[in-house]
Image: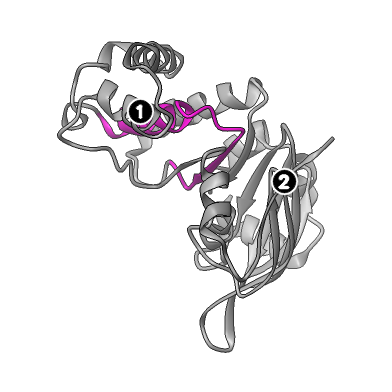
Amino acid sequence: MNSAILVKGITKRFVPGKPALDKVSLEVRTGEVLVVMGPSGSGKSTLIRTFNGLETIDEGLINVLGISLDANQDDRQIRRIRRRVGMVFQQFNLFPHLSILENITLAPIKVQKQAKSQAEAKAIELLFQMGIKEQAYKYPSQLSGGQQQRVAIARALALNPEVMLFDEPTSALDPERVKEVLDAMRSLAKRGMTMVIVTHEIGFARDVADRVLFMDEGRVIETSPPAEFFNNAKERRSRQFLNQMM
């Protein structure tokens, strides 16, 4: 199986002497769902933001879909990656003055130069997949948080990404809205999308992950299949974290 993302010894410092990422290495295989877990401040979000150039690195090498990034980041390389990698954030970041349909079709029309009719047909198909086709002509303020996050997922998918990154996509949602977003992500996983997901949702990670990567203090502590990680974690720090979460 090919590598979608290959990370070799990356380090990132926001404060001198205290790395946010400390010589991190990992591989995400094509078609794999990797769930990244760890306590607050462990470097999870910083890590996945390096995969599409939202965060620079100070040392090491990242290869995403055959495109390399190092400490001397090249804007052209970053643009090439972002055309092939979608990302969903904690906040929905929808344009409030645009309809749901317009939010989803904006980038395909402006960036990919798709015909409006083609982009709209794809958007309606994605909204149907997300279970919110009937919301197409509403505005973000008329939708619940869970619905808005599913729109954000549809917007990312509208650019036909090969890899999807999720940075705690349910953390800003009311508890009753979490399931609808996780279900949408489950359906993506079933269709074979390569995904890296930062989340604290243990039940979801058990169901969907091919592997769980656990981080603490900017380092990878353990990478294991979910059954092994949640039932018999190898590392003491992993077990401490799980005892606090469960």
Determine whether 198 is above or below 163 in the image. Answer: below
Picture quadrant of residue 4: top right
In this view, the residue in front, 13 or 77, is: 77
Q: Is residue 198 visible?
A: no
Furthest residue in direction right, as rendered: 1
Pinpoint residue 196: horizontal percent, then vertical percent.
Answer: 61, 43
Residue behind mark 1: 151
Residue 66 bears which disc, if any? Answer: 2
Quadrant location of the N terminus in the rendered image = top right
Label 2 amino acid? Gly
Pinpoint residue 194: horizontal percent, then vertical percent.
Answer: 66, 34
Q: Is residue 158 one of those drawn in magenta? A: yes
Per the rendered image, the range of residues in magenta is 144-169
Q: Is residue 211 left or right of residue 103?
A: right
Nearest to the eye among marks 1 and 2: give it: 2
Pinpoint residue 172: horizontal percent, then vertical percent.
Answer: 35, 46
Determine whether 231 is above or below 100 in the image. Answer: below
Cα separation between marks 1 and 2: 29 Å
Q: Secondary structure at mark 1?
A: helix
Q: Secondary structure at mark 2?
A: loop
Residue at the image position 45 percent from the left and 26 percent from the top: 158
In this view, the residue in front, 61 or 203, is: 61
Label 1 amino acid? Val
Determine whether 133 is above or below 96 in the image. Answer: above
Pinpoint residue 24: horizontal percent, then vertical percent.
Answer: 71, 66
Determine whether 53 is above or below 70 in the image. Answer: above
Name which of mark 1 and mark 2 comes first in the sequence: 2
Q: Is residue 86 left or right of residue 36?
A: left
Q: Is residue 237 left or right of residue 95?
A: right
